[in-house]
Image (tube, rainbow, N blue to C red):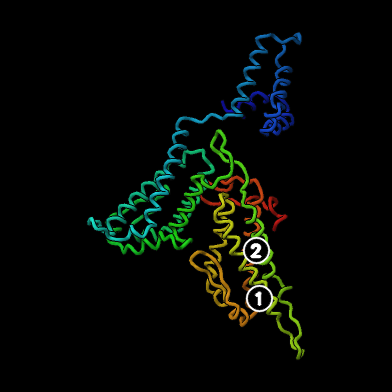
Amino acid sequence: MNFWNSTNSIFGSGSSNSSTNLYSLFSERASIKNGTYKRLLKNYFSTVGGDSNGTTSAAKRRSSSNIIDELLKEKMYPTVSKETQEANSNLTSGLGSLQSSVSALQKSSTYEDTENGSTAADKVVSAMKSYVTSYNNVITASKSSTLSNKTAYVANMMSTTSKNANQLAEIGVTLKQDGTLQLDETKLKNTDISKVQKLFSSDNIQSYGSTIASRVKFAGGSSSTGATTGTGSTTGTDTKKPTGTSAAALKADSEALASNELYSKRKDSDGNETYDVSKILSKAKSFVSNYNKMFDDAESSSNSGVLSNLSYIRERTKNSTSALKEFGFSVDNKGRMKLDEETFQKSDMEKVQNFFKDYGSYVASNASRVNYYMNTNANAASGYTSKASYNIPAVSDYNASI
């Protein structure tokens, strides 16, 4: 029985205002637990169940009671079909297999010949076949699964694969229209295996393999702090509160570096107007420190809102490599930033300001969202669409932080 269809038919004869008010009340799970929901239903049936003399038969009372019990049962424990249960089970087991196959492609031993005659090329092909099979099983199962705390990360994996489609195609792995992968073994065998190893590198946190491994880990629930409900969804907050502090600090540093105030000139001993470079440098150093701290704290988060916005910041930083380098900023393979103070002090501060008006504002906006998601009850899956994109919530949800 679909609860809302049943309820709408039951209350369809009432006024639109009454239906709206009842819907609002019934939509709250708390109203079921505290008995409000049942009392409202009883009150309704007591008013519509009488005969022409205003009396209610025992049979009608029993019928009303049965309907109420069914509505409560359906609301508290929504029915999950056998097909959906199977998809949920396949998704959970599939993620375990995918984790193992990604791990194999990240091991250095996979790219070495062995004494028993197995060549590195053969081992890579075998590992890739396992990866493609496991990946496809996960994608297929996720399409029918109700485990939203897992499918959110699958959506993120699909997005990551799409972004790396050209690199995957170079080694013989093609992305199909339905989101699954297809392997050309012949092309893979003729490919320089160093390309495969680089694509799945565990030393580079931004590599395709590292990103997939991270999403699989979170989807597997090993980092989840919430309680699983009867329908497979997860509730609860992310407990890594320090991230909110570093993200908020990064937001403040980014905004300062994008502001006019920080670059206001002062007169030197000769009466010339100059930038207060030491003041700007101090803020730049704080920016780097909080940038790294936020990533240190947040990369192990189980919240997809946090992870998505970290990804946006990382991508913008990657695309700004040349400009950052000009001012003394560099980023290592782990995604951590460093600042060459001497290079920064010699930089044109007007150019620094113009750069941070764009880059700094972008980082501030996404750092604010990281802070928001770390300090709210945002569900780990609440922001993803079926097309593996991310929906940012309404601005009003976090405008106090921005």
Relative to 39, say whether 243 is above or below: below
Q: Is residue 166 visible?
A: no
Q: Residues within 10 Å of mark 1 (few under 14, many from 20)?
A: some
Q: Quadrant of the N terminus?
A: top right
Residue underneath mark 1 = 281
Mark 2: amino acid: Leu
At x 40% / y 52%, what residue is drawn? Answer: 102
At x 58% / y 74%, what residue is drawn? Answer: 339
Mark 1: amino acid: Leu
- Residue 289 rendering spot, x and y as whole percentages: 62, 67
Looking at the image, residue 28 sits to the left or right of residue 195; the answer is: right
- Residue 110 rendering spot, x and y as whole percentages: 33, 57
Relative to 121, say whether 132 is above or below: above
- Residue 265 rendering spot, x and y as whole percentages: 74, 80
Q: How crowded is mark 2: few (under 14 residues within 10 Å), some or many (20 or more)?
A: many
Relative to 34, say whether 196 is above or below: below
* Label 1 secondary element: helix
Looking at the image, residue 133 sits to the left or right of residue 343; the answer is: left
Q: Which mark is residue 250?
A: 2
At x 47% / y 56%, what residue is drawn? Answer: 211
Choose top left, top right, bottom left or bottom right for residue 31.
top right
Relative to 247, say whether 154 is above or below: above
Looking at the image, residue 80 sits to the left or right of residue 108; the answer is: right
- Residue 231 rendering spot, x and y as whole percentages: 54, 34
At x 40% / y 45%, what residue is drawn? Answer: 97
